[in-house]
Image (spheres, rainbow, N blue to C red):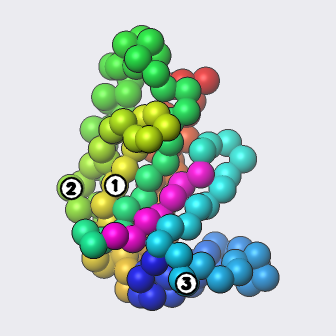
Amino acid sequence: MSSDIAKTLRETLLDLGVPQERLGSFDRHSSIALNFKTISPIMLTADRHGVWMWSELKNLNSATLNIHAEKLLLSLQHALPSVVTGQPVLGKGLRGYEVKALLDDACTGSAKTLQIALDGFFNLMTSLHSIFK
């Protein structure tokens, strides 16, 4: 993970109340997982294009996709703050469907901007997980 986003992520997590001792060292990794009780982990991955936040929808398959397509499409149409395209992308990953969003460059230097982006993505994933329970 680039040092800028790693530093900003550390500051964001501390601002959110995560104890310093729980953070460990993620500065040398290309991805970090933020684990939650109610949804799949939100991953932050740095690559040559920038920093992506993404998460799996483990209960989504072709059958549930057909049943819930309208709700899914409506949820994905809402704008997310600090995302390059303004909206997340649904795609097929290695282990099933994933929702991805490329973070705006402003997120790498501002803990507040990154926090707002993560909050928006968390809310989206919470909404999507409630559809596919």
Residue 51 pos. (x, y %):
36, 69
Few, some or many residues within 10 Å of mark 3 (<14, 14–19, 20+): some
Do residues under tags 2 and 1 come within 8 Å of each other at their CB atoms?
A: yes
Q: Residue at x 24, y 54 (%)?
A: 86
Residue 72 pos. (x, y %):
38, 27
Q: Earlier in the sequence, mark 2 or mark 1?
A: 2
Observer-nearest residue: 59 or 116? 59
Give the residue number, with chain letter if any, for mark 3.
27
Give the residue number, with chain letter if any, for mark 2.
85
Do residues under tags 3 and 1 come within 8 Å of each other at their CB atoms?
A: no
Q: Residue at x 50, y 42 (%)?
A: 56
User: Could you tell me if residue 110 is visible in this image?
Assistant: no
View extreme (left): residue? 85
Give the residue number, with chain letter if any, for mark 1.
101
Residue 65 pos. (x, y %):
40, 19
**Residue 50 sits in quarter:** bottom left
Main secondary structure along the magenta-highlighted residues: strand
Q: Residue at x 30, y 44 (%)?
A: 89
Observer-nearest residue: 95 or 26? 95
The CA distance from mark 2 to mark 3 is: 27 Å
Residue 39 pos. (x, y %):
62, 43
Q: Earlier in the sequence, mark 2 or mark 3?
A: 3
Q: Nearer the viewer, mark 3 or mark 1?
A: 3
Q: Magenta stretch: give its range.
A: 41-47
As drawn, 3 above or below 73 = below
> What SS does tag 2 mark?
loop
Left or right? Give the position of 85 relative to 109: left
Few, some or many residues within 10 Å of mark 1 (<14, 14–19, 20+): many
